[in-house]
Amino acid sequence: MTTQAALTREQGAEFGPLYASVQQFYAHQMQLLDLQEAERWADTFTEDATFDVPTLAEPVRGRPGLIAASRAAAARLAEAGERHRHFMGMFDVAQGPDGALQVRSYTTVYASVIGGESRVHRVCVCEDVLVREGGRLLVSMRRVTRDDLA
């Protein structure tokens, strides 16, 4: 992503609305995840998306895999009596020549014990490729790295 600054500067006045649409996309996507809306959350990814997170043994590919992973995570949270909230920010957005958006952001995940205290669960870096399909932004590739892992 070393070319992001140059690509961002070239976008000029059009960058503000683009940035706002990216922020709204992530706000909506994270709400769906945190509300455990597995199908609707998976629908924010392309059909053949790759989802690479260190909490899974291998990357997930495609919407059916995303739905299964989301449901499994929801089951683990229910068993633990916890709720998670994902806060994404510090978006570094650049549009490539093909129109795809390279987005790097920081994500803080808060865990709340139902009826108890909240705590920071983990801090991550999220690197996405967003594409437009049917006028909607969708994630085609997501790679998440945790700050606490080498």
Image (spheres, rainbow, N blue to C red):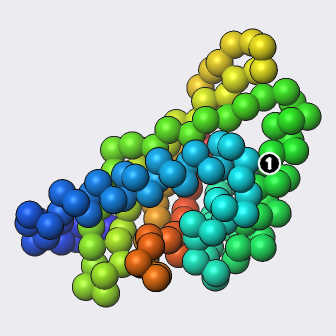
Residue 147 in view (yes/no)? no
| x and y, in percent, of residue 4 in the image | 24, 66
Q: Residue 6, relative to residue 38: is it above or below? A: below
Q: Residue 61, relative to residue 15: is it above or below? A: below
| x and y, in percent, of residue 46 in the image | 58, 77
Could you say which is closer to the camera, residue 146 or residue 18?
A: 18
Residue at figure coordinates x 46%, y 65% from the top left = 128
Disc 1 marks a residue whose amino acid type is Ala
Residue at figure coordinates x 78%, y 20% from the top left = 114
Q: Residue 134, relative to residue 141: is it above or below? A: below
Residue at figure coordinates x 36%, y 58% from the top left = 22
Task: For the N terminus, give its image quadrant.
Answer: bottom left
Residue sticking out furthest to the right: 79
Label 1: which secondary element: helix
Q: Residue 63, relative to residue 113: is it above or below? A: below
Q: Quadrant of residue 84?
A: top right
Could you say which is closer to the camera, residue 133 or residue 129?
A: 133
| x and y, in percent, of residue 74 in the image | 81, 45
Residue 126 in view (yes/no)? yes
Residue at figure coordinates x 37%, y 52% from the top left = 23
Q: Which residue is mark 1?
A: 73
11 vs 143, left or right, is left
Residue sticking out furthest to the bottom: 98
| x and y, in percent, of residue 59 in the image | 70, 68
